[in-house]
Image (cartoon, rainbow, N blue to C red):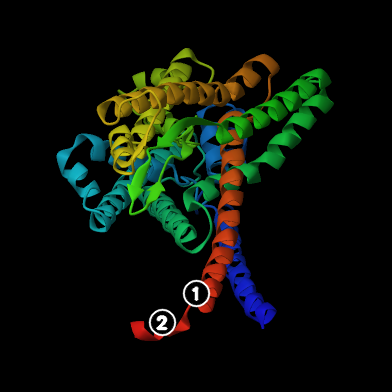
């Protein structure tokens, strides 16, 4: 009976996880299918030639995040970057605007309202970017028959594609495993890697890149992958001591534990937000710079291209800013100090209350600074590879960081759900063994 009771529960838990994994795979398949459906009225051959000439610029970076959909001008060409940009704006509003700050404190109702504002912001940003892309393509001679009908079709198609991806990512988060938006970005990057690796081997074969440079690139990617895994798992463990207290005739407490603080609490969010922070003005300046009277936008677009000093400085500044911003949202030293005080715990050598909060704030500040520097170094690696070794794509950096972190988070969530089902089974089994007569009294 014990085996027969345990087996159905285990199989049920595995079936739930299997269905969640299948849903994630199905959603990724839909995403990749839509990335190959082009917008009507575009000369695909001219578009391919244009992107081959700008593979290492802003367009190449934008194309990487869209999984190659932009180079085909497919229905998902904008990707999820407008949604990420809208999320950045809303998170800034929740910290600076009293109305949105109050919504954040209202629980589920406030969260739904903020999500609604984020979707509306996504609609506005994707519409502006869609119009900019259509105008830029017309100026480049990519559209054989430009006209009002093309602008309408392109704007409606691209905007709808982004809104669909936003909805698809939310469904993956709710019905699948992991964060849906991160998984969509991950799928886009991974789908682009085979072509990028093929370009490298083609360059080596043609003599444009030496075999020694290829070995250096492979060693750098392996080293950075190991560093990312190590840093993402690294913790600063602050010792915690529970004071002894008497409960009845028993003496409770006196135990030692620790408070784990991650070095990189924000994970992969700062590089993604920083990329969106730079991509939005860079793409808009490139799209609208062709208009009469707006030629100064072309100079701005050139300064925002990867490899330029302004691009690097803004990218590092944005990563550091979003690292501290996200850490401030996720970790509140005052609340943590109050929880420790209420549970009778203290940090050895630090007074409970304000002193503990100040100490935790100082530790978290140093950890966040170290984590932001690590993220900046990893994210700037592609620019070094392009300038120093003439690597023709954004291999490593933000893309490698996203791939490694998303895979680690995905595996951790699968393991957590497996343990959760196993724990639920053990709890039910324990409840079944303990005094069934008490269960009847509850009814």
Which of the two residues, 147 or 373, is positioned nearer the viewer here?
Answer: 373
151 sits to left or right of 429 = left
Residue placed at 42% from the left, 35% from the top?
A: 241
Residues at circles 1 and 2 in contact by the CB criterion of under 8 Å = yes
Identify the secondary structure beneath mark 1.
helix
Quarter of the figure with residue 233: top right
Circle on res. 431:
1
Which of the two residues, 143 or 374, is positioned nearer the viewer here?
Answer: 374
Does residue 321 lie above or below 102 as drawn? above
- Residue behind mark 2: 439
- Residue situated furthest front in the rendering: 249
Residue placed at 72% from the left, 29% from the top?
A: 222
Disc 1 packing (10 Å; few <14; some 14–19; many ≥20): few
Work out whether residue 73 can be spotted.
Answer: no
Which of the two residues, 97 or 382, is positioned nearer the viewer here?
Answer: 97
Quarter of the figure with residue 57: top right
414 sits to left or right of 81 = right
In the rendered image, residue 174, in percent from the top left (x then y), is placed at 45, 61
Work out whether residue 412 can be spotted.
Answer: yes
């Amino acid at each position: 009976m014990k085996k027969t009771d345990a087996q159905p529960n285990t199989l049920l838990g595995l079936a739930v996880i299997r269905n969640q994994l299948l849903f994630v795979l199905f959603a990724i398949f839909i995403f990749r299918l839509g990335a190959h459906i082009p917008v009507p009225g575009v000369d695909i051959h001219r578009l391919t030639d244009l992107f081959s000439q700008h593979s290492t610029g802003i367009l190449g970076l934008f194309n990487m995040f869209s999984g190659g959909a932009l180079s085909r001008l497919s229905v998902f060409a904008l990707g999820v970057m407008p949604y990420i940009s809208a999320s950045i704006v809303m998170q800034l509003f929740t910290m600076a605007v009293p109305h949105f700050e109050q919504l954040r404190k209202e629980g589920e109702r406030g969260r739904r309202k903020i999500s609604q504002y984020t979707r509306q912001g996504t609609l506005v940003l994707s519409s502006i970017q869609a119009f900019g892309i259509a105008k830029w393509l017309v100026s480049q001679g990519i559209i054989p028959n430009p006209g009002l009908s093309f602008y309408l079709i392109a704007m409606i198609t691209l905007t709808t594609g982004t809104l669909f991806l936003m909805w698809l990512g939310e469904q993956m988060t709710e019905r699948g495993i992991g964060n849906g938006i991160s998984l969509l970005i991950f799928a886009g990057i991974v789908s682009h890697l085979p072509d990028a690796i093929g370009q490298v081997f083609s360059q080596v074969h043609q003599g444009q890149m030496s075999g020694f440079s290829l070995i250096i690139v492979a060693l750098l990617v392996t080293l950075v992958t190991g560093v990312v895994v190590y840093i993402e798992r690294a913790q600063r463990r602050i010792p915690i001591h529970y004071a002894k207290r008497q409960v009845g005739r028993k003496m409770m407490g006196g135990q030692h534990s620790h408070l784990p603080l991650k070095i990189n609490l924000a994970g992969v969010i700062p590089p993604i937000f920083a990329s969106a922070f730079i991509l939005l003005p860079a793409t808009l300046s490139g799209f609208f710079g062709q208009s009469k009277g707006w030629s100064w936008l072309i100079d701005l677009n050139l300064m925002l291209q990867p490899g330029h000093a302004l691009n690097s400085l803004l990218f590092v500044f944005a990563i550091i800013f979003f690292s501290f911003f996200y850490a401030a949202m996720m970790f509140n030293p005052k609340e943590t100090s109050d929880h420790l005080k209420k549970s009778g715990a203290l940090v050895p050598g630090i007074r409970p209350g304000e002193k503990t909060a100040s100490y935790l704030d100082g530790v978290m500040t140093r950890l966040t600074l170290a984590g932001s520097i690590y993220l900046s170094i990893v994210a700037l690696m592609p620019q070094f590879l392009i300038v120093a070794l003439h690597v023709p794509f954004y291999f490593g950096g933000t893309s490698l960081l996203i791939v490694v972190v998303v895979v680690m988070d995905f595996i951790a969530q699968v393991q957590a759900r497996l343990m959760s089902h196993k724990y639920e089974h053990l709890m039910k089994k324990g409840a079944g063994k303990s005094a069934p007569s008490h269960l009847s009294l509850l009814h």
